[in-house]
Every structure is written in C-alpha cells, then in structure tokens.
C-alpha cells in the first residue's frame, strides 16, 4: 500500500489578511459617509454590509477549522524564507526605488538603474556585463520609442532634457 | 440597394489601396494595446498632429486600424504573461494564461486572433446591415436596463467564486467597495478617499489593472525560471501549433458568432465598454457551456468568448457615432473630433451627403481585420516565445514598463504608488487563493453600477421598484435570473444522471 500523502494544513493566518483588510477598509469607508446624504450611502451600505457578512462567515469558518486542528494561524504561504532566496524582498526594494527615483531622474535613467539592479538581484549577481548591456539597450530603446518617436508623457529628467536639447540643435 | 452595393465595392477597393497605412498601424496598435496605459485613444491623441495633417480617408483608415489592432493587442500579454493590456481584455487571461503555462501559447494566440478577427469582421458586417435598428438600441437602454447589463457582468464573480465561494465573494465585494472610492455622483461627497485628492474622481482603472495583474504577476513568476510549466514540452516555433489553434477556433465558429454579437449589442450603448462586454460574454459562455467546470483551466471557449466580444464592441461603438453623432467610447470621441476637423457632420444625413465616409469607416474596419488576420497569425509562432524568456529578465521588464504605463493617463506620480499598492494587494490575493480578476471586476463595474443605480433612484424619488418598471428591463431581469439558475439546474441534472448510471 502506498503511503498517503500528508496534506499540509491550511495557513489561515495568511488567508485572513484579505478579509481583515476588507473589514478595516469597509469600516473606515462607513465612517466617511456616516453623515452624508443618502445618495452617498445607499450603495456603499448595501455592498459593505454584504462584504462584512461574508467576511464574518469566513472568519467563523476559520475559527471552526482552528478548533478542529485543520489549519494554523501561520503566514508561510505569504511570507517565508524563499522570499529572500528568490530575491523577492530585494526586487520589492528595487521597485520602490523605481517609483521614488523616476520623478527625479526621469524614465530612461531610472529604468536603466532599475533593470540593472533588479536583474542583478534576481540573477544573484551573475552575468553582470550582459545585464548592464541589456538594461542600457532596453532603456534607450524605451526612450527612443516612447519619448523621442511618440512624445509620450513619461516622467522626464536629466537624460531626456539633454537629448531633447541635442536633437533640437541638429 | 444597387447604388449602395456599388459604393461599398468602390470603398472596399479604395480601402485595400491603403494597405501601406494599415500594416504599420496594425503593428503600432499591437504595441500600444499590449502595454497597460497606452490605449488606441491615447495614441491617437499623441499622434493628433499627424492625424490632422493626413487627408480624411487616410486619417479614417489610420484611426480605425489602430483601434482594432489595439483591441486585439491587449489580449496578447493577457495570454502570455497574465497581464491584460486594457480592461477590455481582463477576462482573457482566465483561460488564455493557463493555456500558455501549459505550453500551448501558440494555440492560445491563434485562437485569440481568429476569434478577434472573425468576431470583428462579422460584427462589422452585421453593424453595416442593421445600422438603423442598432442605432435605436441606445435610446432604449436607460439606467434601469444598464443596471441589469452590469449585473450580467458582475455575476461573473459568482462563476469565479464557484471554485471557493467565500473567497470569491470576498474578493468580488472587496473590489466593489474599492470601486466605490471617490465622490458620490449626486452631491460630490468624498467617500473613502483617505484624504487623497487624486482619488476624488474614483480609483483610476489603469493603476488598478497594472497593480492587480502586472505587478503581482511579476513578483509571482520570479519563483520559476520561465513562465511555461517545467513539465510542458519545450517546443520550437512551428506551423502545426498555429494551425491547430486556428482549427480549434474555427470548430467553435458558432461560439465566436454569438459572443461577438453580445459585444456588438453592448458596444452600441454609449458608455458601455469592452470590459463589460467581455465579462458578460465570458459569463454567458460559461453558463451555456456543456463543460462549465473546464472554464478557468485553459478552455478554448473561455478564451474565445471575451476576445470575440471585445472586438465586437469596436464595430458597435461606430454605430451611435455615425448615425447619431454620439461617441460610444473614448476612441470614438477622439475620432469624432478628428473627423469634425475635416468637416464631416454626423447623423443620418452622413450616408446621403458623404456615403464614402460613413461606409468607409466600416470598410476600413473590415479590411483591417482581414489584413490583421493575414499578418498577425504567422507571428504567433514567435510571440509565444515570451513564455520561455527567463523570468529574471522578464519580471523587471514587466514592472518598469507597466508601472510607468500607470503614470501616463493622468500624469500623477500618485498613480504609480497606487499601482504598487494594488500590486501588493494582488500579490497577497494570489498567494492566499483569492482571485484578482474578481477584485478587478468589482473595481471596474462597481462605480458604473452605482452611477446607474443612483440615477434610477433619483428619477423615481427613491422608489426601488423603478428597477422593474420597464418592459425591456424586465425581459433582461428574467434573462439574468435564468442565466444564474441555469448552471445550477444543469449541474443538478448532470449529478442526477451520474447517480442513475451506476444504478442501471
């Protein structure tokens, strides 16, 4: 007889994150419309009421599962050691950096830096020369297509302004 | 009749002669359609000086081709990397992406192209033939009827919830709640805005789309070396898979026909868009399918329905524009501006005074779909290779180009941070078994539903029975009820039949 595969218990702590966020947001939303005209309230109370009800049922269900030892309050499906191993945390940091820097450095430079850093993190520092070249080609191609050719409203910085001046002067 | 046929023939050959405009525009449309934030409407605005400098015929051919190609292009990243280029393609990854992950990217792209081209071509012909009737649809669709149409789309949440009822409902209603952020439509009272002025107009759709799909997907795919499943057979570009995809789509020709007609019918209603059409078509396709349990697992019909419907919308939006001068969507509104610049006056007289312009728009659409079919289909062999690009290169590319796409429509840095917040929400949802598509349906349809609901209540002084006050509305209510009950009845009958079989 083959050994039966032991099913991993459900990580209910992680599964409760969305319902908790939903409840918190709904209560906050209700607080903003408490003294508003009925037109601002009617649909929100209807939708929010159903959402609170469904979340309540889900939480009760989780409590029942915890009591029956069918799950634990763990978060390992959401956050675990693999997030460091795969470079996910570093990638998240690079993404945050991208959002912050793009307003100051413009699209092209920030994209180059972001691609370089994030590819290096995800590639665990291997093939750095190739990654640098790739990041440079992609960011310049992005500038050429979206900013130079189509004049798209991308954030502009030192590189874009310099290139614009260079190109307009012939 | 004979005169119209002569004009149509003339216009057809004249449009074909513009192939040199259509072919490059198709490729431009595929690019702008594929990146969230870049729609056909944005591109026509960006290229407005060029469009206005063209003569009228060239301008029409350019705008219409771009519109069709962008609509089709939005489905490509939806299938290959689970990132819909526009909200109209939000239902496409439900079955397209599982196909791509299983190593059937080529087939999925071929199915999508065939469904889009045939759907678009067919609805163009239908729209041309039934223009006077279709133009009146907009007059009959008031707030009450629109509420039921929205509910058809929202009922897709219930289908998604079928896999895990509570989680599906939480995701859908959470999306509806997020969609309610912004000022109310009557007194402009700010609600749930957390003090951000940028949210007074509601949650912008592109950052929500970018975050829920693109950002969260980028953080998920880095766990694997490539998108395609490790156990999927590695393949070189080949004609066999492309032709197989064409065969799968053509075998389901009737499915393409009726789902594209749904798109056409929704497209002629000003304000209704491709997202509603694709959600409704997907939901209806699943409802009347003999194998509803296969939806969401890479079922061709689940891919055909949204793709043919959202391309059916393209021809639908032209009807109120040409016959009534009412644009059915953002792109049609920009087309109106460009054509008015060239001295075109819209309305029924257009087909008497400038028949070549009126018929020319439909013909440009038909010819674009024909040329698109011939030019794009062979490329599916190479496009599908996106799924084999190592994720260490693909994920940063997705993040950089989609996040900045979130910035483009309103030029607020806030929208990039908002996309990031939606990305975190989408990531948590994916990792814990909640469906991001259900959240997005709520975000898209929630504000629309509320707007029509409040309009109906205002008209009736708060009497909720106004929802059952029109004949067409009541017919739609009955259809909605039947479409919700039918899967349950069919499931029950199937279960009973299965119980009876072993007993025999």
Image (spheres, coloured by chain):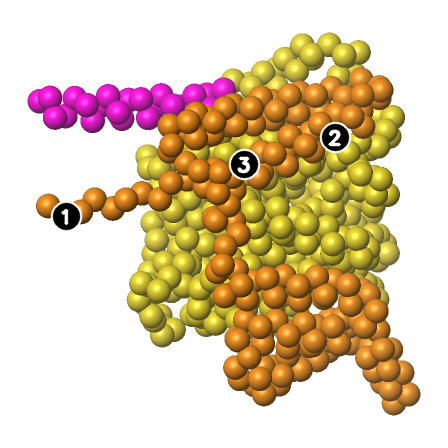
Q: CA distance from mark 3 to mark 2?
A: 18 Å
Q: Which mark is residue A28?
A: 2
Regarding mark 2 in the picture, which secondary structure is present there? Answer: helix
Residue B357 picture location, percent across and down:
72, 54
Are marks 3 and 2 in one subunit? Answer: yes
Please give the chain letter of the residue carrying mark 2.
A
Is A110 on the left or on the right of B186, as rendered? left
**Which labelled disc corresponds to residue A16?**
3
In the rendered structure, which disc, 1 or 2, sits on the residue that comes first in sequence?
1
Distance (Cα) linking label 1 and label 2: 53 Å
The residue positioned 72% from the left and 33% from the top of the image is B180
Q: Colour of chain B?
A: yellow
Q: Position of residue B405 (x, y in %)?
A: 70, 60
The residue furthest bottom is: A170
Q: Secondary structure at mark 1?
A: loop
Mark 3 surroundings: few (<14), some (14-19) or many (≥20) residues within 10 A: some
User: Label 1: chain?
Assistant: A
Image position of A89 with respect to A25: above or below: below
Rendered residue at 81%/28% (across/down): A32
Compared with A146, B115 (above or below) is above
User: Any magenta on residue B491?
Assistant: yes
Query: From the image, which quarter does the N terminus of chain A lie in?
Result: top left
Which span of residues is magenta-colored?
B481-504
Q: In this rendering, which labeled residue sits more in front, label 1 or label 2?
A: 1
N-terminal label among 3 and 2 = 3
| Residue denoted by label 1 | A2
Horizontal side, residue B169 vs residue B425: left or right: left
For disc 1, the neighbor class at 10 Å (few under 14, some 14 to 19, many from 20) is: few
Chain letter corresponding to the colour orange: A
The reply to whether dot 1 and dot 3 touch (C-beta < 8 Å) is no
Answer yes or no: is residue B160 visible. no
Instruction: Please tell me how crowded label 2 is: few (under 14), some (14-19), or many (20+) other residues with Cα within 10 Å.
Output: some
């Amino acid at each position: 007889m083959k050994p039966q595969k032991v099913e991993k218990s459900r990580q209910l702590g992680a599964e409760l994150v969305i319902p908790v966020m939903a409840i918190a947001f709904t209560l906050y939303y209700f607080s903003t419309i408490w003294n508003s005209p009925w037109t601002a309230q009617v649909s929100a109370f209807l939708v929010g009421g159903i959402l609170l009800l469904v979340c309540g049922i889900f939480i009760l269900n989780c409590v029942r599962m915890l009591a029956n030892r069918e799950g634990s309050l763990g978060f390992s499906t959401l956050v675990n050691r693999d997030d460091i191993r795969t470079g996910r945390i570093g990638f998240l940091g690079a993404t945050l950096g991208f959002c912050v820097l793009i307003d100051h450095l413009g699209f092209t430079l920030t994209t180059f830096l972001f691609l370089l850093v994030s590819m290096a993190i995800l590639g665990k520092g291997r093939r750095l020369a190739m990654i640098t070249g790739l990041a440079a080609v992609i960011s310049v191609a992005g500038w050429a297509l979206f900013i130079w050719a189509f004049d798209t409203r991308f954030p502009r910085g030192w590189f874009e302004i310099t290139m614009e001046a260079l190109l307009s002067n012939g | 009749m004979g005169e119209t046929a002569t004009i149509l023939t003339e216009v057809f050959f004249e449009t074909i002669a513009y192939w040199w405009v259509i072919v490059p525009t198709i490729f431009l449309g595929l690019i702008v359609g594929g990146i969230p934030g870049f729609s056909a409407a944005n591109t026509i605005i960006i290229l407005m000086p060029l469009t206005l400098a063209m003569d009228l015929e060239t301008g029409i051919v350019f705008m219409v081709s771009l519109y069709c190609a962008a609509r089709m292009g939005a489905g490509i990243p939806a299938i290959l990397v689970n990132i819909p280029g526009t909200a109209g393609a939000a239902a496409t990854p439900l079955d397209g992406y599982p196909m791509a992950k299983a190593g059937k990217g080529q087939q999925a792209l071929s199915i999508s192209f065939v469904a889009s081209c045939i759907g678009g071509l067919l609805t163009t012909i239908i729209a041309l033939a039934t223009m006077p009737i279709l133009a009146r649809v907009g007059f009959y669709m008031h707030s009450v009827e629109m509420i039921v149409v929205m509910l058809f789309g929202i009922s897709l949440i219930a289908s998604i919830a079928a896999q895990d009822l509570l989680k599906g409902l939480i995701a859908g209603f959470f999306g509806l709640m997020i969609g309610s952020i912004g000022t109310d439509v009557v007194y402009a009272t700010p609600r749930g805005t957390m003090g951000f002025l940028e949210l007074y107009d509601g949650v912008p759709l592109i950052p929500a789309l970018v975050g829920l799909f693109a950002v969260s997907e980028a953080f998920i795919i880095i766990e694997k070396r490539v998108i395609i499943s490790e156990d999927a057979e590695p393949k070189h570009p080949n004609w066999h898979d492309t032709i197989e995809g064409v065969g799968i789509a053509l075998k389901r020709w009737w499915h393409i026909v009726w789902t594209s007609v749904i798109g056409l019918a929704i497209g002629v209603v000003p304000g209704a868009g491709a997202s509603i059409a694709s959600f409704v078509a997907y939901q209806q396709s699943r409802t009347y399918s003999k194998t509803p349990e296969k939806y969401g697992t890479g079922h061709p019909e689940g891919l055909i329905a949204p793709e043919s419907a959202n391309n059916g919308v393209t021809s639908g939006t032209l009807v109120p524009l040409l016959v009534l001068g009412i644009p059915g969507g953002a792109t049609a509104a920009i087309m109106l501006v460009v054509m008015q610049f060239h001295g075109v006056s819209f309305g029924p007289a257009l087909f008497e005074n400038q028949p070549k312009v009126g018929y020319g728009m439909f013909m440009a659409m038909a010819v674009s779909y024909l040329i698109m079919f011939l030019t794009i289909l062979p490329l599916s062999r190479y496009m599908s290779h996106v799924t084999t690009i190592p994720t260490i290169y693909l994920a940063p590319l997705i993040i950089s180009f989609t996040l900045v796409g979130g910035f483009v429509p309103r030029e607020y840095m806030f929208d990039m941070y908002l996309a990031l917040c939606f990305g975190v929400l989408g990531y948590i949802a994916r990792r814990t078994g909640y469906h991001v598509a259900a959240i997005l349906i709520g975000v898209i349809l929630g504000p629309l539903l509320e707007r029509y609901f409040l309009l109906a209540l205002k008209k009736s002084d708060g009497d909720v029975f106004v929802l059952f006050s029109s004949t067409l509305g009541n017919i739609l209510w009955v259809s909605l009820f039947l479409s919700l009950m039918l899967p349950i009845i069919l499931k029950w009958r199937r279960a009973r039949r299965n119980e009876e079989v072993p007993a025999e």
